[in-house]
Image (cartoon, helix red, strand yellow):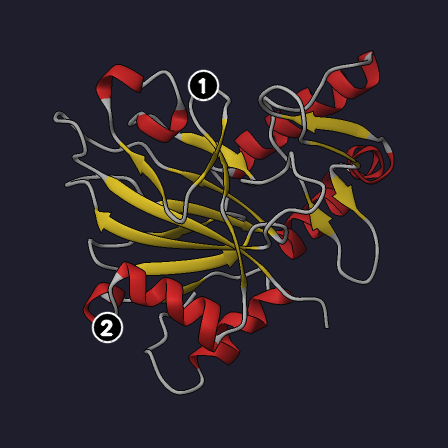
Amino acid sequence: MMPIDLHPDICESIQQLKSSDKPIVFRNGLSLMTMDEWRHFLMQDCGLIEDTRHYDTEGDMQKKNWWEISYIPEKSNTYAHSSTPQPLHTDNAWFQNPAEINFFVMWKQSIKGGAQLILPISRLLESLANEQPDLLNDLTSVPVVIKKGVGQFENHTTIITKGKQPRIFWNYYRTQRTSKLINTMCEAFFKFLGSALSSNMVDTLYCQSGDCFAFNDTLLLHGRQAFEAKLPRDRVLYQSMWRIPES
């Protein structure tokens, strides 16, 4: 996860996220372009398709170019606005046609803590195959429904899809427990990922204020360490989501 500088081949670096399960980092990216300029760059220069679908903390669908993830004490019952650790997950698991690329701007980092936690799917699959092959078999063969909010969007999938490029769709709290098998599988996977946090499986990515980073949401799991915060918006992260055009 070495940072890369902005250069004429930056679009190629971003487009490589189509098949890469590693994040890319732009140190002090806000000194290179504003948020609006980054958005225009991703759309016009890199050819990505903006996906403005977001669910708010009430579970209602909103359309926004940038989604704010910030510390807000009165809303701290949700991970987006708390200072607590965030478990490993994918952001768009409940969409059947999710945005692959997540692009983030660290507007204001906390004084202490708040690092991103990254688990690439290649490393996850290797570990599951070696340590819990039966769980891996369930994750790749048992259909589940993942949904958030009311109504139109839900994803019918296996948690890990097979194929030339395996992908993962995981949200512990949004996977519907419609059978004992699914419940047992989800609990076992959640426990496995919790143990992974204290191992060398998970990478730590710390971004300072002004840094930008991006990753493929379907090719890795990510979470967040706890951080120190007292006042509203002591930590502010902006997120935008992008689909890769079909070739």
Residue at the far front: name it.
Answer: 63
x%, y% of residue 163?
84, 57
For the question of whether residue 26 can be seen, the reply is no
For the question of whether residue 156 can be seen, the reply is yes
x%, y% of residue 209?
20, 53
Query: Residue at the location (40% across, 71% down)?
Result: 41
Q: Is residue 118 above or below residue 81?
A: below
Q: Is residue 103 above or below residue 129?
A: below
Secondary structure beneath label 2: loop
Report whether 1 appears left or right of 93: left
Give the quadrant of residue 235. Answer: top left
Query: Residue at the location (29% across, 59% down)?
Result: 35
Mark drawn on residue 32: 2
Residue type indicated by callout 2: Leu
Query: Residue at the location (50% across, 74% down)?
Result: 46
Residue type indicated by callout 1: Glu
Give the quadrant of residue 219. Answer: bottom right
The residue that label 1 is drawn on is 58
Q: Earlier in the sequence, mark 1 or mark 2?
A: 2
For disc 2, the neighbor class at 10 Å (few under 14, some 14 to 19, many from 20) is: some
Q: Of discs 1 and 2, which sits in the foreground?
A: 1
Q: Nearer the viewer, residue 11 or 167?
A: 11
Q: Nearer the viewer, residue 157 or 229?
A: 157
Give the quadrant of residue 165. Answer: bottom right
Q: Is residue 137 above or below residue 215?
A: above
Q: Nearer the viewer, residue 98 or 27?
A: 98
Report whether 234 appears left or right of 15: left
Q: Nearer the viewer, residue 142 or 202?
A: 142
x%, y% of residue 223?
45, 39
Residue at the far bottom: name it.
Answer: 8
Q: Alpha-carbon distance for marks 1 and 2?
A: 35 Å
Query: Residue at the location (71% across, 50% down)?
Result: 167
